[in-house]
Image (spheres, rainbow, N blue to C red):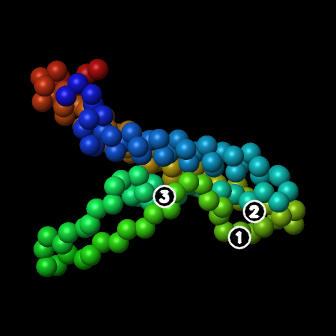
Amino acid sequence: MSDPLAVPLFSLAARRLSWAAARERVLAQNIANLDTPGYRPKDTATFAATLSAAAPAADLALTAPGHLPGTATSAQGVRSVAENGRQPDGNAVSLDTELEKLADTDSAAQVTTAIYQSYLGLFRTALGQGTTG
């Protein structure tokens, strides 16, 4: 395989990192509008919702009697967030909330990158190229 994105895990990692970058842009916009009267914060759909919306619909199969049936929901794009704690000027951005979301998104990107690098190292080892590079 010459294209590392041909491996499903690598493709999934690329999608997750793309989602994280998009979410960071939206959250940065919220922070930039912290003092804008009437501004309502926005957020992206969860990665799971984004992924399920992008993937073709497939029926989930129960492979064992103890398995629970799955459910699928989808939400796409950027959406407004509930208006909790609005300021007197109508602004609903909470810096603490936005920074917490930003930290969570950054952590998700770091974990994804670490998994990607680990699997890449396994492929290099399997190909006899070691883990440097």
In the rendered image, which quarter is residue 32 located in?
top right
Which secondary structure lies at badge 2?
Answer: loop
Residue 76 seen from this side:
yes
| Residue receiving disc 1 | 84
| Residue receiving disc 2 | 92
Residue at x-position 74% and y-position 59%: 40
**Circle 2: is it few (<14), some (14-19), or many (20+) Cα within 10 Å?**
many
Tell which of 17 and 119 is nearer to you: 17
**Circle 1: is it few (<14), some (14-19), or many (20+) Cα within 10 Å?**
few
| Residue receiving disc 3 | 46
| Mark positioned earlier in the residue sequence (2 or 3) | 3
| Mark positioned earlier in the residue sequence (2 or 1) | 1
Which secondary structure lies at badge 1?
Answer: loop
Q: Quadrant of the C terminus?
A: top left
Residue at x-position 83% and y-position 52%: 36
Q: Nearer the viewer, mark 2 or mark 3?
A: 3
